[in-house]
Amino acid sequence: MFISFEGIDGAGKTTQIELLKNYLFKMGVEFISIREPGGTLLAEKIRTILLDPEISMPDRAELLLFEAARADLIDKVIKPNLEKGKIVICDRFYDSTTAYQSYGRGIDFEKTLDLHEFTVNNIHPDKTIFLNISLEESARRIRSKRKDRMEQSGDEFFKKVYNGFQELVKKYPNRIKMINANDSIKNIHENILNELKL
Ligand code: TYD
């Protein structure tokens, strides 16, 4: 089973993924957990480039770098582990690219989806947990953080990303499950387990 977690910055994915991992560990279920961009030597190097505030790049290059990191992660980590029957948990996957690079940066939607198909080679998340917080809450939660290149993109951009995620939830209701992330950590965790039927 392949599970991805999505949400705008500060939605609490990391905390919830930790709780899910603890739960699976206690249940004796085999799993691996990775984050995007990252998870392989190549993808971690690409991540450093993508988040470096000193580096500027055209939106096309940004899109292709996220996809390149993903292609490596698919071949080296996600596919082999799914084949072994493990649960794969991924902190962000291609919905982030659709939200940030297509809705956010304005790259053509259909082209972006075609590129995802090319990148993932038929490996798709079975379920996607979308942790929903408001833009105001997101801004509040990341205010004190030192901002990486993506986080420096400005309010207009984040508004588009936010709206993009809302659109994606509507477009893929069977796969993407929206969870209110403005709730207690415990309630969110229980809602996630319910959605995943774990
Ligand atoms: P990260 O520090 O992992 O953010 P978070 O903890 O919020 O997941 O940085 C990843 C950043 O890259 C984040 O701002 C979202 C962005 N991103 C994209 O723009 N496109 C993508 O395809 C992915 C995977 C991430």
Image (cartoon, rainbow, N blue to C red):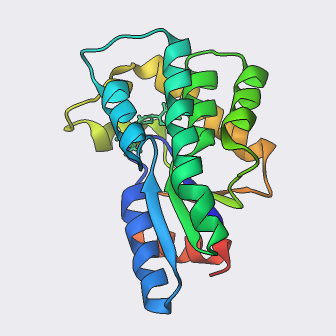
The residue located at (56%, 17%) in the rendering is 105
In the displayed structure, 129 sits above or below 113; it is: below
Residue 28 visible? The answer is yes
Q: Quadrant of the N terminus?
A: bottom right
Give the side of residue 67 with respect to residue 123, left or right.
left
| Depth check, front residue: 85 or 58 | 85
In the displayed structure, 53 sits above or below 140; it is: above
Ligand 1 - quadrant of the structure image: top left
The residue located at (61%, 73%) in the rendering is 84
Instruction: Residue 11 in the image: state x and y as whole percent.
Output: 43, 50
Instruction: Residue 174 in the image: state x and y as whole percent.
Output: 80, 58
List the single residue furthest toward the bottom: 27
Q: Quadrant of residue 141?
A: top left
The residue located at (25%, 36%) in the rendering is 143
Q: Quadrant of residue 67?
A: top right
In the displayed structure, 160 sits above or below 9; it is: above
The residue located at (68%, 43%) in the rendering is 120
Instruction: Residue 18 in the image: state x and y as whole percent.
Output: 38, 69
Give the side of residue 143 with respect to residue 2, left or right.
left
Residue 4 visible? The answer is no
Q: Quadrant of the C terminus?
A: bottom right
Instruction: Residue 127 in the image: state x and y as whole percent.
Output: 68, 61
Number of labels in the image equals: 0
In the displayed structure, 191 sits above or below 29; it is: above
